Image (tube, rainbow, N blue to C red):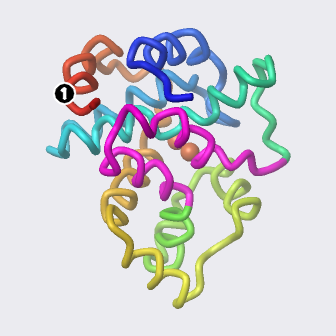
Amino acid sequence: MSLTLQEVHDLLLRRGQTQYGLEAINQLEHALQCANLAELAGETSETIVACLLHDLGHLLAAEREGTVEHDTTEDDLHQFIALPFLRGLFPEAVLEPIRMHVDAKRYLCLIDPSYWNDLSIASKHSLEQQGGVFDEAQANAFIAQSFAEEAVRLRRYDDLAKVKDKPVPGLEHYQARLAEVAY
Ligand code: FE
Ligand code: FE
């Protein structure tokens, strides 16, 4: 079931042209902007790769359904969809921040009052579908997990990676990091 690096690359190029939810950019642009912000912040290769691939589940779901439009009316659980496809390819340091990136939003909404305010309309909308803001007990359980801090940082890059026509390095820029981090 696991994808190869080549298949991950091809999927990003083939399905990356689909719109990123309700935002003004496409999935590939979003992935590249997210990875770029992580790289500029000095993150590890594992976290940068997690940023690049954090929404791969959206692309896999679209591939499976043969659709080009992303259905925004219900939660697609995209943070889990990519995991079985990537588990044979990347370590936990890549998989766990991907798995936790939706919960990181629920966490940040509780601990940072300004965070919810700054979310895009689309992201506020999806928050409700994803279970809403964490309570204290949920937040404590979340942040105690390995790679939760990385997931929270990924989430911050994710939220900023929605800028129309921003020039950032292309997918080829990440080939060496992908190869370095992959088994
Ligand atoms: Fe996502
Ligand atoms: Fe995202």
Q: Quadrant of the N terminus?
A: top right
Q: Quadrant of the rendered structure where residue 129 is? A: bottom right
Classify 36 as above or below 79. Answer: above
> Which residue is most to the right?
73
Q: Quadrant of the rendered structure where residue 38 is? A: top left
Determine the main secondary structure of the stretch shown in magenta.
helix
Percent coordinates x, y for residue 167 in the rendering: 34, 18
Q: Mark 1 falls on what kind of element?
A: helix
Q: Which residue is mark 1?
A: 180
Q: Is residue 143 left or right of residue 58?
A: left
How many numbered circles does the render carry?
1
Classify 93 as above or below 27. Answer: below
Q: Residue at x 19, y 46 (%)?
A: 43
Q: Residue at x 29, y 11 (%)?
A: 172
Q: Quadrant of the rendered structure where residue 66 is? A: top right
Q: Which residues are magenta?
A: 74-102
Q: Residue at x 46, y 35 (%)?
A: 86
Q: Quadrant of the C terminus?
A: top left
Percent coordinates x, y for residue 71 in the rendering: 81, 36
For residue 101: magenta?
Answer: yes
Percent coordinates x, y for residue 25 in the rendering: 57, 25
The front one of 22 and 92 is 92
Q: Is residue 6 left or right of residue 150?
A: right
> Which residue is most to the left?
42
Percent coordinates x, y for residue 28 in the rendering: 50, 21
Q: Residue at x 62, y 41 (%)?
A: 81
The front one of 162 and 181 is 181
Q: Amino acid at mark 1?
A: Glu
For residue 167: magenta?
Answer: no
Crowd around label 1: few <14 · some 14–19 · many ≥20 (10 Å): few
